[in-house]
Amino acid sequence: MWASSWEPTPRYSYGFFRIEVLGALATVLIQWIVTGVLVYEAVERITKQNAIHEIKGWVMVLLSSISVLVNIFLVILFHRHHESQGHTVNINTESAYLHALGDSLLSIGVLIGGLVIWIQPKWKIVDLICTFIFSLLVLKTTLAMVRKLFGVLMECAPRGVDPTAVANSLAGIHEVVAVEDLHIWSITAEKVFLTSHVKVNPESNPYTVLDQVIQHIRQEYKINDVTIQIEV
């Protein structure tokens, strides 16, 4: 988040906003790797007889309880920060929030497994079952974030903005003949860009039409970074 606030340079003319996206993607990937390692270790503890006796219920309960408390604190912290931003969505903060939420789910799974094993030491399989179930929940909570990150990196139009609808609405402006080469993309969830060629009637004032088009885009679609080329 700090790096994304660096000023643009001639080489990086769009600034460093996308570092925020790369950081969020790294957060999700790390979470997936850790989740995969946990599932692998849970399977290994069950399949290898010499490792079964290493499962101690009270240790699992103690450590997972601490982890649950810490992650609940982080979830509340990131949620309050998200609410304080209003309609502005910071993709890195949202990723950190999902990371803490995912860790909370995994910790709750370990806590449940630890309690069961503590009470019934022979039920070692519960460790594997809880780890597997809560790992699936973690994947489910992060898939939406991955789709959002993928959309930003592929420079597709952001959700809630239909390029066809935008082109049709611009074509309905007085003196506009056609809308061509319309591109809408985002370099981060908060920063959306629009460029287009707009053909106008030869008799019209191109500067007046340009102002109308830009004002329409900013008011109707809340896109402030607009570049329009007027063609007579």
Image (cartoon, rainbow, N blue to C red):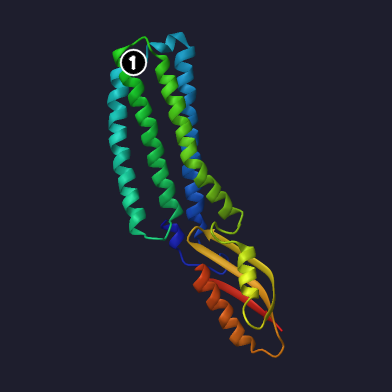
Q: Amino acid at mark 1?
A: Ile
Residue at 38 percent across and 41 percent down: it is 100
Residue at 62 percent across and 78 percent down: it is 173
Residue 120: name its quadrant. top left
Residue at 50 percent across and 63 percent down: it is 191
Q: Is residue 224 above or below residue 136?
A: below
How many numbered marks does the figure carry? Answer: 1
Q: Is residue 191 above or below residue 232?
A: above
- Taking depth in this image into account, of 208 and 185 the one nearest to the observer is 208
Helix, strand or loop at mark 1: helix
Q: Is residue 52 above or below residue 200?
A: above
Residue 224 visible to the viewer:
no
57 lies left or right of 18: left
- Taking depth in this image into account, of 18 and 103 the one nearest to the observer is 103
Residue 155: name its quadrant. bottom right
- Taking depth in this image into account, of 131 and 203 the one nearest to the observer is 203
Quadrant showing the N terminus = bottom left
64 lies left or right of 199: left
- Taking depth in this image into account, of 2 and 106 the one nearest to the observer is 106
Residue 215 visible to the viewer:
yes
Residue at 56 percent across and 72 percent down: it is 226
Quadrant showing the C terminus = bottom right
Query: Residue 218's x, y, as percent?
Result: 51, 73
Q: Which residue is mark 1?
A: 117
Query: Residue 91's x, y, as percent?
Result: 46, 53
Q: Residues within 10 Å of mark 1 (few under 14, many from 20)?
A: many
Query: Residue 27's x, y, as percent?
Result: 46, 43
Query: Residue 221's x, y, as percent?
Result: 52, 68
